[in-house]
Each structure stands twice: as C-alpha cells, then as structure tokens.
Image (spheres, rainbow, N blue to C red):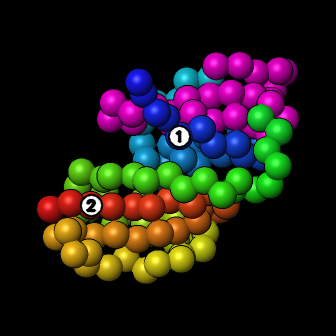
Amino acid sequence: MLAQPFIAVENCKEEIRYYQKVFGGEVVILRQQGDTVLNADLLVEGTTIKFADIQAAKPLMKGDYVRVFLKIEEEEAFRRIYGEFAQSGTVHTEMYEAPFNGLLAIVNDRNGVCWVLSYYR
C-alpha cells in the first residue's frame, strides 16, 4: 500500500510550478484540456505529490481539512521550505525544537493546504 498527498488547487498549471519552486523535483503533466492543466504529479526525492485543478477535483472547501505530514531529511531544506510557506501562507505553529530531537512547524501554504513539517536529527 502507498499513500500519496493529493492536493486540489486553483490554476494547477501555475501552482504546480510554485510547489516545484518550494520542493524542487520534476513536474509530470498527466492530463490537460487546452491550456488548463487538470492533473499533474510532482516527483521529489522518491515521493510523488499529486495535484488536481479544482475543475477536475471539485473540492468542497479550500484546504479540505487535510494535513500533509512531511518528513524532511535535511535541516537546510526544512528551513527553506518553512520560509517559503510562511512567506506566502499562514503559520499555525512557529518552527520549534521538538522533543524528538528535531524541528517541527505547522503552516498553511498560499492555497490553504496545511503542512506539518518535521526534521529529525
């Protein structure tokens, strides 16, 4: 069994590039209609994050009460990702030293997706 984040966004074509800027990786367009990207994957370090335009996914509300837990392998990457999301989103829990000997933060990105960012030393 494999679980993958599935994120619905407005203007998938633009937003997939935003997430690529934050995480790096390779964008794979799966389905489009004219200039509108309906489904795309972002392949990052052996992980696939799936995206759909709201035209395709039809979410009930922005964010849909889903939190994505992201275990980040390097502290520098953790700080960079946190900074990108904090700059354009909403910080719920500031970055802090967690009891598991690492860093933790909870932040919504500019699309309302809630990310639980973690880094284990």
Relative side of 2 to 108, left or right: left
Count the marks: how many?
2
Q: Residue at x 41, y 71 (%)?
A: 105
Residue at x 58% of width, y 49% of height: 18
Looking at the figure, which quarter contains the N terminus? top left
Return the residue nearer the eye: 18 or 52: 52
Q: Position of residue 71 (x, y in %)?
A: 32, 52
Which amino acid, mark 2?
Tyr
The image shows residue 25 at horizontal and vertical percentages of: 42, 36
Task: Report which quarter residue 57 is drawn in.
Answer: top right
Q: Residue at position x 22%, y 75% from top? A: 99
User: What residue is disc 2 on?
Assistant: 119
In the image, taking residue 85 as reference, residue 61 lies left or right, namely right
Give the SS element for disc 2: strand
Describe residue 12's horizontal placement relative to residue 1 as left or right: right
In this rendering, the answer to whether 106 lies above or below 59 is: below
> Which residue range is magenta in the image?
30-56
Q: Percent from the top left, x then y, of residue 79?
A: 34, 66
Confirm whether the magenta stretch covers residue 39: yes
Question: Who comes first in sequence, dot 1 or dot 2?
Answer: 1
Label 1, label 2: how far apart the Cα atoms are: 18 Å
Q: Are marks 1 and 2 in contact (CB under 8 Å)?
A: no
CA neighbours of label 1 inside 10 A, class few (<14), some (14 to 19), many (20+): some
Reading the image, the residue beneath label 1 is: 5
Q: Amino acid at mark 1?
A: Pro
Main SS, magenta region, reads strand
Name the residue located 42 percent from the left edge and 42 percent from the top edge. Answer: 24
Residue 6 belongs to the span the image colors magenta: no
